[in-house]
Image (spheres, grey):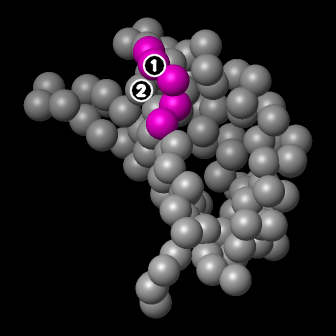
Amino acid sequence: MSKIIVLASFYPKKDKVNEVKEVILSMIKPTRSEEGNELYNFYEEKNNDNKIISFHLFEIYKDSAALDFHRETVHYKDYRSKIEDLLEKPREVKVLNSIDSI
């Protein structure tokens, strides 16, 4: 089985940056403790004025079953119920299957 990589990008409404950040921060500890999660890192992108313009998650799961498990957790469902209304545009999520990685 190959590892599953998830790249998720979030573009918050200008007045919702802190709320988006808090919602995603609440996902870190429970997701990292999932048995099939190998990496769950959270990043921000800033513009030239040092203002946050987007957030990004880089996730690695040991296989597709681990990602499926993640998507059924209470913390994932809670995050999904909150995040969409805080965003300027829909989340961008890419699910990648590892072909050749270390």
Residue 78, placed above or below residue 58: above
Please say if 54 is above or below 85: below
Residue drawn at 37 percent across, 33 percent down: 54
Contact? badges 2 and 1 (CB < 8 Å): yes
- Mark 1 is surrounded, within 10 Å at the Cα level, by few (under 14), some (14 to 19) or many (20 or more) other residues, namely few
Q: Which residue is mark 2?
A: 11
At label 2, counting other C-alpha atoms closer than 10 Å, the crowd grade (few under 14, some 14-19, many 20 or more) is many
Judge by depth and name the residue closer to the eye, 76 or 68: 68
Tell me which segment is drawn in magenta. Answer: 88-92
Q: Which element carries disc 2, helix, strand or loop?
A: loop
Label 1 sits on residue: 89
Judge whether residue 65 is colored magenta: no
Instruction: Indicate the position of residue 1 as horizontal and vertical percent values.
Output: 70, 83
Is there any visible trace of residue 42 in the rendered image? Answer: no
- Percent of width and height locating residue 10: 46, 32
Q: Which mark is residue 75?
A: none
- Specify which label sits upstream in the sequence, 2 or 1: 2
Element type at mark 1: loop
Considering every residue shown, the one lying at the far left of the view is: 48
Quadrant in which residue 5 is drawn: bottom right
